[in-house]
Image (cartoon, rainbow, N blue to C red):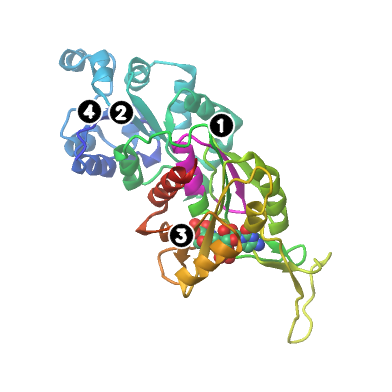
């Protein structure tokens, strides 16, 4: 139980309907929740609903003498341990970045010295707009925590980044222990997602990696204070704002980028599912159907992590992943040794609900002198544990 005092600031987006669930779950975890709503938020969820679930009067006006008499807005701002704006629309994000205080919520946000977090929720095009990116970067620089957004289908029918994180994801973030900055001053380079090996202009060989595990590692490393380079194959996820994203397609491109960044890194993590082989020749034109069989000649791709681990100068602490469907420990230990890695995170990808394209995973971490099993859990949580474990191994 947490006893955290949370002001939940609801602004006017469709995801506001999730705030009833969010409030209930926060209270279950021992948080005290006071709700502040903007005028437009009330079009999406009623103050009465929020009053019922929070068990407290809902505040929505700076100029309400009764509410001010009960708890003045400055007192309110001081009461909070955390102000969470969820959903945070483009409008309130822009107001926060500009320091505008034209209603109760924006005034509280300027009057507080509590931790402030926002859960952005907006159309994907609005999220991608340079104005929004700049505003989010400004807030992040000021120490505001940016939680999400997630990706997927949106209320308007678009698909992309801009969905508010789910209530339980936000609850986990509210309740997490403050992270020690154990990776402060360190640079962590992570490969994530699949690679795509072209066969012709429209076809490729790839795999089911979603990038979730690698992106979670990037978030975790940032949370522990590291500077993060994220070399990513094609995925639909949004890179954490503070990370430096290097998008690539093929194993060869990933290899080139990795070899450029690895010598400047303290830690290199190969979480990408890299294609071991690529087409010997990429057809210039779309291949035509011919006969009942087609023989493709494949040639070996460079082994990225083995080449990083073989660096003679400025070799980073090198961590691989092993995706196995059988004899997980034996194969993982083999890769640890053969690729000369410092650590390998083995996942059994034959089990449904973990590994490729799932939200959860289970890992066993092997190094020369240790073996640590981490049970099935959310990839974000797991990533934090992995990054903390790596931090203990750095000199
Ligand atoms: O992306 P998600 O959907 O979240 O799924 C996560 C994951 C299952 C992809 C991830 O947890 C994982 O296991 N990644 C490694 C997958 C893999 O390709 O394993 P491997 O056993 O084939 O490769 C072993 C190691 O060598 C890996 O660190 C890999 O990045 C690296 N490798 C492999 C081939 C190659 N040519 N170059 C490499 O660097």
* CA distance for labels 4 and 1: 31 Å
Ligand 1's quadrant is bottom right
> According to the image, label 2 marks what residue?
82
> According to the image, label 1 marks what residue?
133
Query: Which percent across, then down, holds residue 236?
Result: 56, 51
Q: Are circles 4 and 3 on residues that touch, CB within 8 Å?
A: no
User: SS at mark 1?
Assistant: helix
Q: Earlier in the sequence, mark 2 or mark 3?
A: 2
Comparing labels 4 and 3, the label whose residue is closer to the camera: 3
> According to the image, label 4 marks what residue?
58
Q: Are circles 2 and 4 on residues that touch, CB within 8 Å?
A: no
Crowding around mark 3 (Cα neighbors within 10 Å: few <14, some 14 to 19, many 20+) is many
User: 148 above or below 365?
Assistant: above
Picture disc at residue 291: none
Q: Are circles 4 and 1 on residues that touch, CB within 8 Å?
A: no
User: SS at mark 4?
Assistant: loop
Q: Earlier in the sequence, mark 1 or mark 3?
A: 1
Comparing labels 2 and 3, the label whose residue is closer to the camera: 3
> Viewer-proximal residue, 70 or 17?
70
Chain part drawn in magenta: 215-236
Q: Is residue 91 left or right of residue 129?
A: left
Crowding around mark 1 (Cα neighbors within 10 Å: few <14, some 14 to 19, many 20+) is some
Q: Earlier in the sequence, mark 2 or mark 1?
A: 2
User: SS at mark 2?
Assistant: strand
Query: Which percent across, then down, holds residue 213?
Result: 48, 54
Comparing labels 4 and 1, the label whose residue is closer to the camera: 1
Comparing labels 2 and 1, the label whose residue is closer to the camera: 2
Picture disc at residue 366: 3
């Amino acid at each position: 139980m947490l006893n955290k005092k949370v002001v939940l600031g609801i602004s006017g987006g469709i995801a506001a309907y999730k705030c009833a669930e969010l409030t209930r779950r926060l209270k279950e975890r021992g948080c005290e929740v006071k709700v502040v709503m903007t005028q437009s938020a009330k079009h999406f969820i009623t103050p009465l609903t929020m009053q019922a679930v929070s068990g407290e009067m809902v505040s929505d006006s700076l100029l309400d003498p009764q509410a001010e008499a009960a708890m003045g807005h400055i007192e309110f701002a001081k009461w909070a341990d955390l102000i969470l704006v969820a959903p945070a629309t483009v409008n309130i994000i822009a107001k926060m970045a500009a320091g505008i205080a034209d209603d109760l919520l924006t005034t509280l946000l300027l009057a507080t010295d509590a931790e402030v977090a926002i859960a952005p929720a907006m159309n994907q095009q609005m999220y991608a707009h340079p104005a929004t990116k700049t505003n989010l970067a400004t807030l992040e620089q000021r120490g505001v925590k940016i939680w999400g957004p997630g990706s997927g289908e949106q209320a308007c029918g678009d698909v992309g980044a801009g969905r508010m994180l789910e209530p339980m994801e936000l609850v986990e973030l509210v309740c997490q222990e403050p992270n020690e900055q154990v990776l402060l001053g360190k640079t962590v380079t992570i490969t994530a997602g699949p690679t795509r090996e072209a066969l012709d202009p429209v076809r490729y060989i790839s795999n089911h990696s979603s990038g979730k595990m690698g992106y979670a590692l990037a978030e975790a490393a940032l949370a522990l204070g590291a500077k993060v380079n994220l070399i990513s194959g094609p995925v639909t996820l949004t890179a954490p704002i503070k990370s430096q994203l290097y998008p690539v397609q093929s194993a060869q491109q990933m290899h080139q980028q990795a070899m450029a960044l690895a010598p400047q890194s303290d830690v290199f993590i190969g979480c990408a599912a890299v294609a071991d082989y690529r087409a010997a020749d990429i057809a210039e034109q779309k291949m035509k159907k011919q006969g009942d069989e087609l023989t493709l000649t494949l040639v070996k791709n460079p082994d990225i992590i083995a080449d990083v681990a073989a660096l003679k100068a400025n070799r980073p602490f090198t961590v691989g992943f092993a995706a196995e469907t059988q004899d997980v420990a034996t194969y993982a230990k083999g890769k640890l040794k053969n690729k000369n890695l410092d650590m390998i995170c083995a996942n059994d990808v034959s089990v449904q609900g973990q590994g490729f394209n799932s939200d959860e995973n289970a890992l066993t971490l092997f190094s020369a002198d240790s073996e640590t099993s981490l049970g099935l859990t959310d990839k974000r949580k797991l990533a934090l544990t992995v990054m903390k474990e790596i931090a203990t191994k750095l000199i």
